[in-house]
Image (cartoon, rainbow, N blue to C red):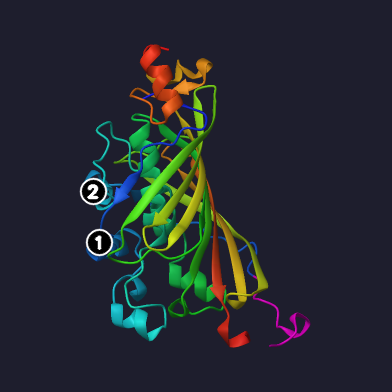
Amino acid sequence: MPDMDVLPPPPEVAGLRLDGTDAYVISAQENDALCRSTGIAPADDGTAHPIYYYVATQVAMGKTVAGLCAACDFDVDDGPMMGSSEVRFSTPLRTGLPYTVSGEVLSLERKRSRKLGVMDVLTYRLRLHGPEGGAALETDNVWVLPRRELA
Amino acid sequence: MTYAVGDELPPFIIDHVDPEAMKEWAIFLADPNQIHLDVEFVKAKGLGDRVINQGPINIAYMMNCLLSAFPGGQIANMTSRFLDNVYGGERIVAKATVDAIEGGKVTCSVRLDSEDRGMVNSATATIVLPPSQSSATSAEQVGNQTPNNPLSWLTWLLYPKA
């Protein structure tokens, strides 16, 4: 196993913008299907399931999952894993409203793990903006990108 | 139910993690990663012999535990950690404990357990209560149903409107 000192550095992606271009609308129909797929009925007051914090930001950010991995010089088929996810809501999400996403990569750190060997830890932040422009939420996600070729 | 600090919320149970739901979520998430869809792909990657649930679904199960316990409540913030995969066909249970009650908000520790393998996700979350429930927070009890631990039951039976 190579010493940490000789591991090549990860790609420099901190600061990479993840702003979306298209608005994302949570349809009442999809919210209904999503809620039922997780075992609950949808709310009857027009609010969407709060897990849309993750769904909407991922779908409407400026890169696909594969594209974000590629920016980190990582093949999506090599199995990115979620490490953690944090969300801070300013307002509940609602169906039928157009939301847009802004965000950026915060860091990409190369680490060694007893379980996974060498891995890159990607942290990125996304904000979901409502039609008035204010952020409805902010989320920080951490993905683990196993670097088996460096182990 | 009325909850106090230290109480466990009713569990939210998924009897059978449905691979068909993973197909729906591949569309919701615009992410057709085959580890969620194709058992043969999972095997070829050495990741087991069952399809792997998308991580956000596991967060949703934990959210459902909270939303079911506090009808009309809104999650204000939540931090979730992924400790292991959830696989198709598994029985999964989301559980939560009340850690703090203050100012119309309840903070809970949440976990998601595989019946066979133990904890696979953990989280902390704060829920903003609707006005009908938050009025009780000065007494450090919230909710609108019956309690679920012996001490709270005794209190509720003696003082049902406390």
Q: How many marks?
A: 2
Question: How far separated are the C-alphas under marks 1 and 2?
Answer: 12 Å
Chain under label 2?
A: A
Do we see residue A54 in this rendering?
no
* Label placed on residue A36: 2
Residue A59 image position (x, y, % from top left):
39, 58
Against B63, is B45 above or below?
below
Do we see residue B76 in this rendering?
yes
Residue occupying the point 70% across, 83% down: A8
Based on the displayed image, in which of its 4 quarters is residue A143 positioned?
bottom right
Residue occupying the point 45% across, 16% down: B136
Residue A25 image position (x, y, % from top left):
32, 48
Residue occupying the point 35% across, 22% down: B144
* Label placed on residue B18: 1
Could you say which is closer to the camera, residue B162 or residue A40?
A: B162
Q: Quadrant of the N terminus of chain B?
A: top left
Chain under label 1?
A: B
In this rendering, which labeled residue sits more in front, label 1 or label 2?
1
Magenta range is: A1-12
Q: Amino acid at mark 1?
A: Asp
Q: Amino acid at mark 2?
A: Arg
